[in-house]
Image (spheres, rainbow, N blue to C red):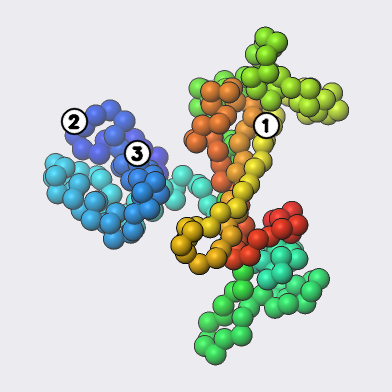
Amino acid sequence: MLEAAKHPIYDGCKEGHSPLSAATRMMGIKTDFNLSEDCVDAFADFFNDYLPEGNLAPQSYYAIQKLVAGLGLPYQIIDVCRDNCMIFWREYANLESCRFCGEDIFQVSAGMSRIHYQRMWYLPIADRLKRLYQSERTAKGMRWHGEHSFTGDISHPSDAEAWKHFRYTYPDFAREIRNVYLGLSTDGFNPFGKGGRKYSLWPVIVTPYNLPPALCMKRNFLFLTILVPGPNHPRRALDVF
């Protein structure tokens, strides 16, 4: 992956244009515009036709995936009880029925493959938070909450009484300015739109409140960590996830 970041996409190209930068940008465009894999393949083929011969641009969606995977942003798919009693994770990962209601995690199927009733997506956040300290710009921003001066107006959660109460209650945590303060939010929506089938999907978003107001609410620092599956509203069971 480091090699893909160091090498120019072709000799004489603009500084910073590398196979990795091209792959991440293409993946971002795919996500923003909900492009199909075939569409990305077509774009990659088109770019390769117009770039100089011998260029290092990724030539397919598969090649883009391989490059982006090297960034170390993995995800886990975890089985969930069909009644949202528990998730089958860590020491419970090998169970095939719920510890509370006894429901099986697999549907009855006539075929050889086993079909899961319900699964969730978990995107670990630790590595993404570590990367904030690997850049000089964001590392400085991650210390902002403890270094800025309060002007009298609440412009950031660190100016509020609740934040100060937390620091007073947990002085050992507050003493290290690089410790991370996270805000968590979620809201459900129907990914199929109003005209589609009934479905409730709940993304859980985490943002580091260490960052100054100009950064902490920007899209780049809103980290998707969990996708709580549907089709039904999780209601009180949301805490299970």
Q: Within 10 Å of the Cα at label 1, are there few (<14), some (14-19), or many (20+) other Cα atoms? A: some
Residue 47 x, y percent position in the rendering: 20, 46
Please tell me how many numbered marks the rendered image carries. Answer: 3
Residue 50 x, y percent position in the rendering: 14, 44
Which three-letter amino acid code belongs to the residue tagged 3?
A: Ser
First-in-chain label (2 vs 1): 2
Q: What whole-number distance in Å separates the C-alpha atoms at marks 2 and 1? A: 41 Å
Q: What whole-number distance in Å separates the C-alpha atoms at marks 1 and 3? A: 28 Å
According to the image, label 2 marks what residue?
Answer: 12
First-in-chain label (2 vs 3): 2
**Observer-nearest of 166 and 60:** 166
CB within 8 Å, label 2 to label 3: no
Residue 180: image quadrant is top right
User: Is 156 on the left or on the right of 5, as rendered?
Assistant: right
Query: Dot 1: what SS?
Result: loop
According to the image, label 1 marks what residue?
Answer: 180
